[in-house]
């Protein structure tokens, strides 16, 4: 998963893009990058690390210009080589830079097309580089047409190029790109899987400035007012001098936002596709609370404890419905990375304890209900249940605000391979035993969907494949899942991590 931002301003945009990326940091902590345009040239800084570590004063001073894009990266497969940090760049036509959130499910096929039809070499394993080259190729094709008529590229020509891109790509993508001499081009996949929102503000000099970003919180943070979500299949073109053009560029767009954004990924203070993430989580808590009340009425729970932080609002609501005390019994160390992004199971195990610590008095002699937003591998839940027992808990029950995660994600969320998912091929009873809980309850898929849909009934269906195994792009077969599996299993991640260390050693020796 990644976070993206693009701004066309009337004064330098470097600080605003930097600030927006820090607000989107939860979407990716692996690498960060900014590209701006000044005097007809790209200025770029990208590297592995958190936003605050990647950009120093000297980089910011170089990132001049009133138009730019930014990216934070969270790799969905393999390790995180700096060569794959975004934005990516191609020199022709014009000079194009691009940043992408999502995953193309036909990247392999497109890579071949790029080589054979467009004679374009792809140098990384990143599907974003493929997407950039496809976009460049299609802009080039439009240019051929305009050359013949002796006219300049117009917004309509850029939209025609995006239409061709949408016809050829499968999967999920929200994209921001810069075209030198023209402006900023942003677009969202025809099923609207990954989020993208448009905003504007008036500068002190009275100019209208525009911004697109993965989440509304980025707009709020730097003083842009939300205009609307970019529609599935829609493209936005903002010229260098601040003119906004929009067009629907997909044949049959449908609305299928990824439900996992609401469960775990997005910040609670964001609104995605008119659904407040915070509100959706509160409703998840209400629904799960009622389910616990109905199905577990003989339960002897003394206290409800969230596993911080995503589930805090959910657990509070469950406690209210059950008329039980809510206590923050775990303290989170904010200064280490998320456990999921660390390759390899052994490192992941150690890191849960480094990340969370129990407050004994909240557990001693009590029957506790622990609440989490989701159970992925089960590593976190198993260790947290152990910690609760060590802290003196009598019984430890567990509630998950989302249903059993049984299938891999192919649309840009970092999920392990199927056989590493504790819910893959298992029912709740067996999962309960494996994580060592005295009872386990999951939210139903119907309740999860309702919790999100209530705020925007226009969305008839969400992208829910990790729970249902139904992939809405309809191009996912066993062969693709095997391929994803190969990229994501622990062995591959350990090997990739070792290669990364080896590469770094070579790099360090050379420098
Ligand atoms: P696990 O130990 O694999 O079961 O991890 C479950 C925990 O990871 C939950 O507390 C979630 O909040 C969190 N989580 C869920 N999905 C992801 C993800 N894609 N990336 C990082 N963390 C996640």
Image (tube, grey):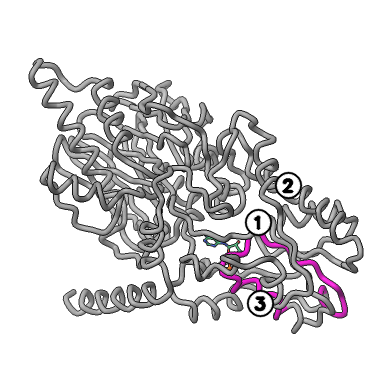
The alpha-carbon separation of the residues under discs 2 and 3 comes to 28 Å
Q: Which label number is shown at residue 403?
A: 1
Query: Of tags 2 and 3, which is closer to the observer?
Result: 3
Q: Residues within 10 Å of mark 1 (few under 14, many from 20)?
A: many
Confirm if mark 1 falls within 8 A of ligand 1. no
- Residue 59 point in image, percent of width and height: 29, 54
The CA span between labels 1 and 3 is: 17 Å
Check disc 2 and report the residue beneath it. 282
| Figure quadrant of the C terminus | bottom left
User: Which residue is at a point 21% across and 43% down the rendered structure image?
Assistant: 133
Q: Pointer 3: what residue?
A: 434
Residue 38 percent coordinates (x, y) = 23, 38
Q: Residue at x 31, y 52 (%)?
A: 86
**Which of labels 2 and 1 is toward the front?**
1
Q: Quadrant of residue 501?
A: bottom left
Q: Which of the two discs, 2 and 3, labels the residue nearer the N terminus?
A: 2
Alpha-carbon span between mark 2 and mark 1: 16 Å
Looking at the image, residue 468 sits to the left or right of residue 314; the answer is left
Viewer-side residue, 491 vs 180: 491
Q: Which residues are magenta?
A: 362-387
Q: Residue at left 13%, top 22%?
A: 145
Is residue 269 shown above or below 399?
A: above
Q: Is residue 216 left or right of residue 448?
A: left
């Amino acid at each position: 998963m990644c976070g993206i931002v693009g701004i066309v301003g009337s004064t330098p945009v470097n600080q605003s893009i930097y600030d927006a990326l820090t607000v989107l940091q939860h979407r990716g902590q692996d690498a960060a990058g900014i590209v701006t345009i000044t005097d007809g040239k790209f200025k770029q800084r990208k590297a592995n690390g958190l936003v605050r570590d990647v950009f120093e004063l000297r980089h910011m001073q170089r990132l001049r210009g009133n138009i730019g894009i930014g990216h934070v990266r969270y790799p969905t497969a393999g390790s995180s080589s700096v060569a794959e940090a975004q934005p990516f760049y191609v020199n022709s036509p014009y000079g194009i830079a691009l940043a992408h959130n999502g995953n193309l499910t036909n990247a392999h096929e497109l890579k071949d097309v790029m080589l054979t039809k467009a004679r374009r070499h792809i140098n990384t394993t990143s599907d974003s580089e493929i997407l950039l080259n496809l976009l460049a190729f299609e802009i080039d094709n439009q240019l051929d047409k305009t050359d013949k008529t002796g006219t300049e590229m117009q917004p309509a020509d850029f939209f025609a190029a995006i239409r061709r891109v949408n016809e050829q790509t499968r999967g999920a993508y929200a994209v921001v790109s810069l075209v030198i001499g023209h402006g900023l081009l942003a677009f969202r996949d025809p099923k609207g899987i990954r989020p993208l929102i448009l905003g504007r503000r008036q500068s002190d000099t009275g100019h209208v400035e525009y911004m697109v970003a993965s989440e509304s919180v980025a707009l709020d943070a730097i003083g842009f007012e939300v205009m609307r979500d970019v529609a599935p299949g829609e493209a936005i073109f903002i010229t260098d001098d601040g003119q906004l053009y929009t067009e629907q560029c997909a044949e049959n767009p449908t609305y299928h936002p990824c439900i996992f954004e609401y469960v775990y990924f997005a910040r609670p203070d964001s609104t995605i596709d008119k659904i407040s993430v915070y509100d959706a989580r509160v409703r998840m808590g209400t629904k799960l609370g009622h389910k616990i009340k109905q199905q577990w009425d003989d339960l002897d729970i003394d206290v409800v404890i969230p596993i911080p932080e995503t589930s805090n609002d959910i657990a509070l609501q469950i406690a209210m419905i059950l008329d039980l005390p809510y206590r923050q019994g775990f303290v989170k160390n904010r200064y280490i990375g998320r456990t999921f992004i660390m390759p390899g199971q052994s490192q992941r195990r150690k890191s849960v304890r480094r990340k969370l610590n129990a407050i004994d008095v909240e557990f001693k002699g009590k029957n506790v209900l622990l609440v989490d937003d989701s159970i992925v591998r089960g590593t976190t839940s198993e260790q947290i249940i152990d910690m609760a027992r060590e802290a003196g808990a009598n019984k430890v029950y567990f509630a998950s605000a989302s249903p059993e995660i049984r299938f891999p994600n192919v649309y840009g969320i970092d999920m392990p391979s199927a056989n590493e998912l504790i819910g893959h091929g298992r029912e709740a009873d067996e999962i309960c035993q494996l994580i060592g809980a005295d009872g386990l309850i999951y939210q139903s898929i119907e309740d999860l969907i309702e919790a999100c849909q209530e705020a925007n009934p226009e969305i008839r269906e969400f992208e829910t494949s990790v729970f249902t195994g139904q992939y809405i792009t309809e191009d996912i077969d066993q062969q693709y899942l095997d391929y994803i599996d190969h990229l994501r299993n622990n062995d591959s991640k350990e090997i990739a991590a070792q290669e990364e260390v080896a590469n770094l050693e070579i790099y360090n020796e050379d420098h």
